[in-house]
Image (spheres, rainbow, N blue to C red):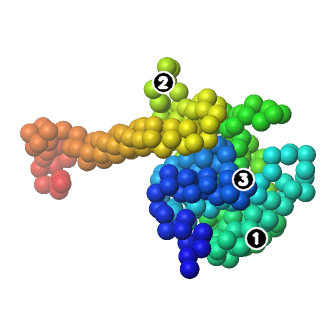
């Protein structure tokens, strides 16, 4: 008999995975809100950009569920420190493998699980960076470049994350892409704007899947084409002769006949 884990892992369409998680949250009271969808979209974009050799389906499913026991009460330190481990235990009860549960537990480092799984480092980057972009009761959301500085030099200052540099490159790449709205804005600003303006979770999912994703994927493809064309032009320019063939023959003939060099000199 298939478990819930089998059911959601066998579903490879991300919007369907989100729908499954949504109904799980209603039935089992697990944590699932707009911030989860927001971070999953960042994870999707990062995986597409970086081409890291991991199972994309596995990672995105883990990103959807790793915060399943998260609490909104920022004052409850014990719950904050323990929700990832509690969530890992719950995920094991509904059929997920020990490795999947370990990956989810390592979304943060409070449980001190070690050695860390590769996929966990992706979840950590997305969870921390994505969280910093969003408003909280005690502060407004950071800009992408500010969040990147804090991620590298504060949050992970004393911790090794194997994909940090790749993530930094990804954020800088995405920050160069402008999305047309009433005014032009970067991809991250546009994503945050949709988040702030869409209160209903299901409507937010629809806007991300059916509006944001097609636009950003198209813009990324166009940006990659421009980069490839620029690289080709540079290579072509580097290989292009400095002079025309006729001019080259004249120069060589002049050198051969020059008394300072000598008619018997070897010139290639």
Instruction: Report x, y in % for residue 127.
Output: 68, 51
In the structure shown, which secondary structural element does the residue marked by tag 1 occupy? helix
Question: Could you tell me which residue is drawn at 74 percent across and 42 percent down?
Answer: 150
Q: Quadrant of the N terminus?
A: bottom right
In the structure shown, which secondary structural element does the residue marked by tag 3 occupy? loop
Question: Could you tell me which residue is drawn at 60 percent across and 32 percent down?
Answer: 198
Q: Nearer the viewer, residue 124 or 92?
A: 92
> Are the two marked residues, 2 and 1, in contact with CB atoms closer than 8 angstroms?
no
For residue 89, which numbered disc appears in the image?
Answer: 1
Query: Most extreme residue toward the top, as rendered?
Result: 182
Which tag, 2 or 3, sits closer to the chain's start?
Answer: 3
Label 2 vs label 3, nearer the camera: 3
Q: Residues within 10 Å of mark 1 (few under 14, many from 20)?
A: some
For residue 31, which numbered disc appears in the image?
Answer: 3
Question: Could you tell me which residue is drawn at 60 percent across and 69 percent down?
Answer: 4
Q: Quadrant of the C terminus?
A: bottom left
Q: Nearer the viewer, residue 53 or 39?
A: 39
């Amino acid at each position: 008999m298939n478990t819930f884990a089998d059911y959601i892992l066998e579903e490879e369409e991300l919007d369907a995975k989100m729908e499954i998680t949504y109904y799980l949250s209603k039935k089992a009271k697990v944590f699932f809100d707009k911030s989860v969808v927001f971070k999953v979209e960042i994870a999707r974009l990062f995986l597409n950009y970086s081409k890291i050799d991991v199972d994309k389906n596995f990672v995105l499913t883990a990103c959807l569920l790793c915060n399943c026991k998260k609490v909104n009460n920022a004052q409850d330190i014990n719950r904050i420190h323990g929700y990832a481990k509690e969530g890992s235990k719950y995920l094991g009860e509904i059929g997920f493998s020990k490795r999947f549960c370990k990956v989810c537990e390592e979304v943060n480092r409070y449980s001190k699980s070690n050695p860390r799984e590769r996929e966990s480092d992706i979840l950590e980057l997305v969870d921390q960076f994505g969280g910093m972009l969003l408003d909280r009761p005690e502060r407004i959301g950071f800009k992408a470049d500010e969040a990147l500085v804090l991620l590298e030099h504060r949050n992970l200052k004393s911790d090794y994350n194997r994909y940090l540099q790749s993530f930094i490159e990804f954020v800088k790449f995405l920050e160069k892409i402008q999305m047309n709205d009433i005014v032009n804005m970067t991809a991250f600003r546009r994503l945050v704007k949709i988040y702030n303006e869409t209160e209903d979770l299901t409507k937010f999912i629809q806007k991300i899947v059916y509006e944001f994703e097609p636009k950003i994927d198209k813009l990324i493809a166009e940006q990659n084409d421009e980069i490839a064309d620029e690289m080709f032009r540079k290579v072509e320019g580097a290989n292009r002769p400095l002079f025309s063939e006729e001019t080259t023959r004249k120069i060589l003939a002049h050198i051969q006949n020059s008394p300072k060099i000598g008619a018997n000199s070897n010139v290639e």
